[in-house]
Amino acid sequence: MLNMRRFIPLLAATAALSLVSAPALAGKTLDAIKSRGQLSCGVSTGVIGFSSADSQGNWKGLDADLCRALAAAVLGNPDKVRWVPLSSQQRFTALQSGEVDVLSRNTTWSLTRDAGQGLHFAGVAYYDGQGFLVAKKTRVTSARQLKNAEVCVQSGTTTEKNLADYSRAQGIKMKPVVFDKFEASLKAFFSGRCQAYTTDASALAFIRAKEAPNPDDYLILPEIISKEPLGPAVRRGDDEWFAIVKWTLNALIEAEELGITQARVDSLKSSPDPAVQRFLGVGEDLGKSLGLDREWAARAIKAVGHYGEIFERHLGAASPLKLQRGLNAQWNKGGLMYAQPLR
Amino acid sequence: MRRAALVQGLVLALIALLLWLLADTTASHLAQRGIRSGFDFLLEPAGFALGESPMAFEPADATWRAFLAGLLNTLRVALPGALLAVLLGILLGFGRLSDNPAARSLCGTVVEGIRNLPLLLHLLAWYFILTDLLPTTEAAFHPAPGLYLSKSGLALPWWGDTGWEIPEPAGFGIEGGARLTPEYLALLIGLSSYAAAYITETLRGAIGALPPG
């Protein structure tokens, strides 16, 4: 689901940039957010667990809560977010042109995007990887058995390229059947047009649970064929704002390690632990270097809870996806979530 | 006269200058913001495979070859499609002018039905028929030796790398011979029947315009 078209963003960027005289590039994003009174957050057009709108128009998910945490830290109110749903073709242009302040939209951090699209990734909010979904009646239990299989895939994505890479590296010939829309690719797979379906593993879990006619007829294969670190991105040229997004994400992860839950934010202010005190703004002032007040991190946790709580709510046992923590567990619990120290 | 030419030249130069300014400003702003652009990606490896291509195409091939394959794919649908449409159109046209009332009304209904539905609907309907109603590859419909019709399309004997090949089921797919995918078949049938309906009416009109005798 991670798109990388070059033309449309380029055309739009051309139009936008050529009309505007060179804007001031440093330190302006925070001022703009404050004077606007709203954080402009680029989200997906609907990926359950990451960012999707419910029937009342409330945005839910890991990516959405990251924006709420940012709004709470910067503006003091998690509801002061302007949600901008973006297709995978629109996302980078929207960030480059300044339409959104932060892109929190299940986007893979890769070299060409980081270095070639004029943006900075602030960290990793979810470690994903690409997998395969098959019908059990095909009796396939490993991706290595997919020789000559037709695989439904969404076009113009890193997913499509990973499939070609895997097929070449393993010497297993697979035939891609491409669709430019997510819904069309799913419908084709469930009608039996393809023997396998490939996309990010987190999405496969959702597709199997919610889209399959009968989830027990389908199997997610054990092979994970790519690394998809998903994280928030900001525009280049504003290091102050980059730091705020980076450290807010770190704060959510650090809070889990310190055991600072949404419910205990206030009561823990009297904790004797200096790390907890610092975090909650009763010890040394961590906000000053970021251009924020001393309670920024406490407000973020109070708004959405720590990383583990967010995960459980939207992706874990309490959600329809029922994903394991896996790579997204804390570093001291066998995962990769390792916050740089807040001190 | 001379002055008019001079003014024209000046206006042209001004427009050229403005265009150059636009391109230059855009390029420098893109570079300043660290956004890479240009057409050099055409020469870089594509990195993706093509589901269907009349020429050999590997993910390691340059991107421009993928565009070329797309162009050839268009021709692969357009040429047989045009031929089929003309043949079917002539047939239906004679049917509509036939003295037999059954043939006349049947052809009339078909042509009017086709002409009154949008092309996109035709394509979706054909694709639905081919991918939803046909059996899966493992249980392919096998009407004659070497012919397999399934959700994966139509496999038929064809001249291949090892001479005349008869398709055989192998693993998930069917190996050997030629394969027409459901996407190709839906496009070919949908486009040619749609065009045929218009050719029918053109033909009927042309014959009707001839003076009798």
Image (cartoon, coloured by chain):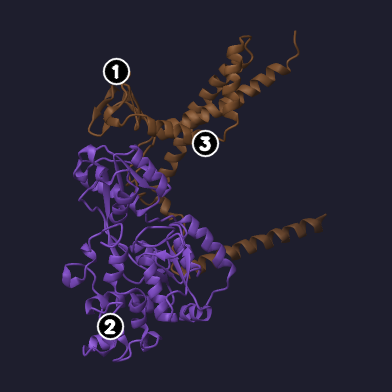
What is the number of the mark on residue B145? 1
- Chain B drawn colour: brown
Which of the numbered marks, if any, corresponds to residue B121? 3
Q: Nearer the viewer, mark 1 or mark 2?
A: 2
The residue at the point 58 percent across, 27 percent down is: B113
2 vs 3, front mark: 3
The residue nearer to you, when weighing A330 against A121, is A330
- Element class at badge 3: helix
CA gap, disc 2 and disc 3: 58 Å
What residue would you read off at disc 2?
A342
For badge 3, the amino acid type reads Leu
- Quadrant containing the N terminus of chain A is bottom left
Q: Residue furthest right?
A: B1
Instruction: Report whether mark 2 lies on the same chain as mark 3.
Output: no
Q: Amino acid at mark 1?
A: Pro
Examine the rendering and report whether any part of residue A291 can be seen.
yes
Q: Quadrant of the C terminus of chain A?
A: bottom left
A232 relative to B173 in the view: left or right = right
Q: Of label 3 and label 1, which has the lower sequence position? A: 3
